[in-house]
Image (cartoon, rainbow, N blue to C red):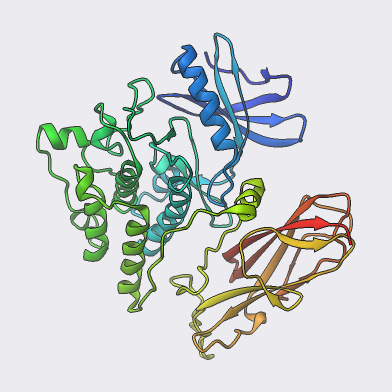
């Protein structure tokens, strides 16, 4: 049953409009009347058995503990008898890759498409490294949103599953999207991280070929339907990118990339070949332990669109005028009171203190690039009366007052060049008394 506009769930979430419908239910935009913020309401209506309800509760609790800059937060969940199961998530402003393709009516540029897919890889690496691993199982252009700041968000966990190698995927929860779902989602075979890799490869195929996904995997197996090499549909797709895509689309899981890290590294190499550079391979993320793990689950969020120690590619920072070109960015460093941040965990600060935050971009020789080349936007969440959001040409911000009434506060810095945001990082302060 569709939710009507102005319908109120749990005396808190007022439905404002319909967003999209899928095989597992629908997604709505709503207003959280308690927190005064927009939210997305995901309605699952697939099964009402006690076992399904128990599974929903377990998986919703796992999703609610996730904190990653390329994933919306799950902030609440509940079941309404004889109606459905509901996830309350961050509402993400932006445009899906499918809408973007429809609007542009042409393939996305290689560099942009690959960089966006790499951000999805970061989200999947995080999901697949949970205990137990979380498999999204519904990756497609409609579920990848690019925000106005250029950040990619992987949305819609309607059919996400906790990976159990001894349990088959149930038919009711399988979820099929023609062209994007691997063969194992059509059968009783278990789905795992390689299922997400197939769907991500199909997504990359689609956004580089005007939204045309590869043939359905079941047809490829039963009818021997071949995959048209993407370069035939879009000559701009280079041979390296094509190899990455086709390997991710192998029918048998054993012949695909075995981990999203392997897929990610080959994408990096594809970008490097296109730009004539060499990139250090990304190592698998090690699960956090001890206090760091607790802090991470408590809400530490961090994103480096510009990877620390990596190579900054394809963001148009070279000058086209007669003035000397600005050096390419090789590294980014965030400092608090002159000391570089060495960890992605919470940063301890004392209330009523005034720390100075500074972001530095370094050239290949380690020399800082002149801060005046960029503009910087410093934001505070939650806002407080002492600190105001600011956009300026200075690469530092002095936090005039760390509020003692809060246990934590997030400071978000964005760097822009020629009006384009190319760097975003979130710092979470763990506030303590002096």
The picture places residue 188, in percent across and down from the top left corner, at: 26, 26
Q: Is residue 146 above or below residue 158?
A: below
Foreground residue among 73 and 206: 73
Q: Is residue 309 above or below residue 120?
A: below
Kindly give the residue lying farthest to the top in the view shown.
82
Viewed as shown, does residue 201 lie left or right of 323?
A: left
**Image quadrant where residue 413 sits:** bottom right
Q: Is residue 115 above or below residue 12?
A: below
Q: Is residue 238 visible?
A: no
The picture places residue 60, in percent across and down from the top left corner, at: 55, 30
**Count of number-bearing discs:** 0
**Image quadrant where residue 241 sits:** bottom left
**Image quadrant where residue 353 sits:** bottom right
Kindly give the residue lying farthest to the left in the view shown.
224
User: Looking at the image, which residue is at 16% across and 33% down?
Assistant: 219
The picture places residue 348, in percent across and down from the top left corner, at: 75, 62
User: Looking at the image, which residue is at 69% across and 58% down?
Assistant: 346
Q: Is residue 360 visible?
A: yes
User: Looking at the image, which residue is at 70% across and 76% down?
Assistant: 339
Foreground residue among 154 and 287: 287
Kindly give the residue lying farthest to the front in the view shown.
290
The picture places residue 89, in percent across and down from the top left corner, at: 60, 35
Quarter of the figure that contains the C terminus:
bottom right
């Amino acid at each position: 049953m569709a939710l009507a506009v102005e319908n109120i769930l749990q005396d808190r979430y007022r439905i404002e409009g319909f967003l999209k419908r899928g095989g597992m239910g629908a997604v709505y935009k709503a207003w959280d009347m308690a927190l005064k913020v927009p939210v997305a309401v995901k309605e699952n209506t697939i099964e009402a058995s006690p076992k399904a309800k128990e599974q929903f509760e377990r998986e919703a609790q796992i999703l609610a503990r996730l904190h990653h800059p390329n994933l919306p937060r799950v902030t609440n969940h509940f079941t309404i008898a004889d109606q459905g199961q509901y996830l309350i998530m961050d509402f993400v402003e932006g445009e899906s890759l499918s809408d973007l393709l429809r609007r542009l009516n042409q393939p996305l540029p290689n560099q942009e498409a690959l960089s966006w897919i790499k951000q999805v890889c970061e989200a999947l690496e995080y999901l697949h490294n949970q205990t137990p691993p979380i498999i999204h199982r519904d990756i497609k252009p409609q579920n990848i949103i690019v925000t106005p700041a250029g950040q990619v968000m992987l949305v819609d966990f309607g059919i996400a599953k906790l990976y159990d190698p001894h349990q088959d995927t149930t038919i009711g929860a399988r979820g099929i999207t023609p062209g994007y779902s691997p063969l194992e989602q059509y059968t009783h075979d278990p789905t795992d991280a390689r299922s997400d890799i197939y769907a991500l490869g199909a997504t990359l195929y689609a956004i580089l070929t005007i939204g045309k996904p590869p043939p359905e995997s079941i047809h490829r197996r039963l009818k021997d339907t071949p995959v048209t090499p993407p370069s035939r549909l879009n000559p701009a797709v280079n041979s390296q990118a094509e190899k990455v895509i086709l390997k991710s689309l192998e029918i048998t899981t054993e012949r695909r990339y075995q981990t999203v890290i392997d897929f990610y590294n080959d994408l990096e190499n594809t970008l490097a070949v296109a730009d004539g550079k060499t990139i250090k391979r990304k190592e698998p993320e090690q699960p956090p332990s001890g206090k760091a793990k607790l802090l991470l689950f408590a809400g530490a969020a961090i994103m480096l669109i510009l990877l620390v120690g990596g190579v900054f590619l394809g963001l148009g920072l070279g000058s086209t005028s007669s003035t000397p070109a600005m050096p390419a960015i090789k590294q980014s460093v965030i400092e608090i009171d002159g000391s570089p941040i060495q960890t992605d965990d919470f940063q301890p600060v004392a209330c009523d203190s005034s720390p100075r935050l500074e972001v530095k971009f370094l050239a290949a020789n380690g020399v800082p690039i002149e801060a005046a080349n960029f503009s910087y936007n410093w934001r505070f969440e939650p806002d407080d009366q002492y600190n105001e959001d600011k956009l300026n040409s200075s690469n530092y911000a002095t936090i005039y007052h760390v509020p003692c009434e809060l246990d934590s506060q997030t400071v978000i810095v964005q760097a822009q060049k020629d009006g384009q945001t190319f760097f975003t990082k979130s710092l979470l302060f763990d506030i303590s008394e002096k």
